[in-house]
Amino acid sequence: MSGGHTHQLYVEHETLVHRLPPQCKLIAVLTFVIAVVSTPRSAVWPYAVYAGALAAVAVLARIPAPLILRRMVVEVPFVVFALLLPVISRGPRVDVLGVSMSESGLAAAGILLAKGTLGVVASILLAATTRPRDLLLGLQHLRMPQLLVQIMTFMFRYVEVVLAEMGRMRVARESRGFRARNLGQLRVLAHSAGALFIRCFERGERVHLAMLSRGYSGRLPTLDGAQARSTDWAVAACLPAAAVLASAAAWFAVGR
Amino acid sequence: MSSPPSLVVEGLAFAYPDGHQALYGVDLTVGRGERVAVLGPNGAGKTTLVLHLNGILTGGRGRVEVAGLPVAKTNLAEIRRRVGIVFQDPDDQLFMPTVREDVAFGPANLGLRGPELADRIEEALALVGMAGYADRPPHHLSYGQRRRVAVATVLAMRPEILVLDEPSSNLDPASRRELADILLALPVTILMVTHDLPYALQLCPRAVILDDGVIVRDAPTYDLLCDDATMAAHRLELPFGFDPRTVARPTG
């Protein structure tokens, strides 16, 4: 739990990127990712353009590179999978550092890694420059169904409450000498998970009661949903525009 | 009296769908501006009574009126504005991402918007001494602060009667006193369900004992706490070392 005003992923700054309305940033990141993913297989140079565009955003938003690198850890399981590709793929083989690898697998792994990494970095930048609360407001502006927005709102509000509850249960278990050493003790953990589920369910009922008591009728009232101006959209469009142009140019080059 | 009492409960009986009868005919009248404590052992029906006051539970016998308006399906919205319930766990009550939105939830459901809504939020937070915290997420507040914000969330609806379920539970002594100061300064009728007898004595001139689904005693809190036989009969015990007779008898 962070002690300050904000959420862990958010990096407090007053920059152009931070100030953009969340809905613009959401659409920009989505478009950017789609453009990256649809890059033709043979093209390599567009990735430099994508990376450059993201770097420019990071500099504008004053998000330091080490911070981005640290958060890229979430990508690790994906990287492991990508690294397996050249080993298990078929086709002509090449020797890399003495290990025989599939040529097509190597290329596929490289492209997969590049696309994945760009998507992850784009999301990291979005999370670092937008408060979770604002992301929800943005989704609401984009006509995301009310029910889904409400579910995410509650998830955001209660994730720390549930984590704290889980922590207390762990302390209670360990205070009575429990340590998860082998699979045989999975039963205890399963019971804990079940108990946690029931507690959450009961809390859900109590919250619903509290909501009804204050006149809840199916809609969460929203506040200060800032309308995006056309200049905001234009500024936000810079990132995906660069990516779309690069991707389209690559397709054009392939087509000839 | 010119204005009707804040709360009238008459012959209220209720059994849960599983057959468990929780209330056997509760009669209780609370005048405007009164502060009344509801005492009683666990399982006496206190929570069941509270949930009847704003129509969450209905369908039993008897009737409930809030400032002259009967609790009925057709006027639930207005009843829920008039009856502000502060639940025991502030994490249940504060479900929105920021304090401001949470305090806004009730009045916004009543249809308030814009500057009028902003005024309500400011007013309610000022009443509980939390004016500077509007943009904080609730989970970054201390437990005592969350309890105070929970009170603000219902004050923002300008209720006729404030119903508090165990307001002093889990509070450290300083937060407990701060909350007492705030509650004493509020210009509303208060019904307070509690096990904290010294707190009841400090805040509420009048107390009722609910046991086995009926109101068994209704008297000045001071007299009740000094009546050892009644206290023992209903499993009510004062904390060690606390003797109400050594406390100055409350006036008024």
Image (tube, rainbow, N blue to C red):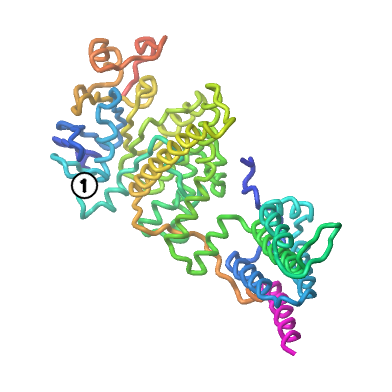
| Residue receiving disc 1 | B71
Residue A56 shown left or right of residue A125 in the figure? right
Residue at the image position 48 percent from the left and 44 percent from the top: B125
User: Percent position (x, y) of residue B221?
Assistant: 29, 21
In the picture provided, is A195 more to the left or to the right than A139?
Answer: left
- Nearest the eye: A234 or A150: A150
**Residue A180, image x, y percentages:** 57, 31
Q: Total number of numbered labels? A: 1
Q: Is residue B68 magenta?
A: no
Residue A251's quadrant in the figure? bottom right
Figure quadrant of the N terminus of chain B: top left
Q: Is residue A12 toward the left or the right of residue B191 in the image?
A: right
- Asked whether residue A53 is in view, the answer is no
Q: Would you place residue B236 above or below residue A216 in this image?
A: above
Q: Residue A135: which quarter of the image? A: bottom right
Q: Is residue A231 above or below residue A10?
A: below
Q: Quadrant of the C terminus of chain B?
A: top left
Mark 1 belongs to chain: B
Helix, strand or loop under label 1:
loop
In the foreground, B208 or A103: A103
Q: Residues within 10 Å of mark 1 (few under 14, many from 20)?
A: many
Residue A110 pos. (x, y %): 75, 65
Asked if residue A240 is among those painted magenta in the image, a careful observer would answer yes
Point out the stretch of residues depicted in magenta. A235-256
Q: Residue at left 26%, top 35%?
A: B48
Please state which amino acid type lies under the numbered disc 1. Val
Position of residue B206 relative to residue A159, above or below, is above
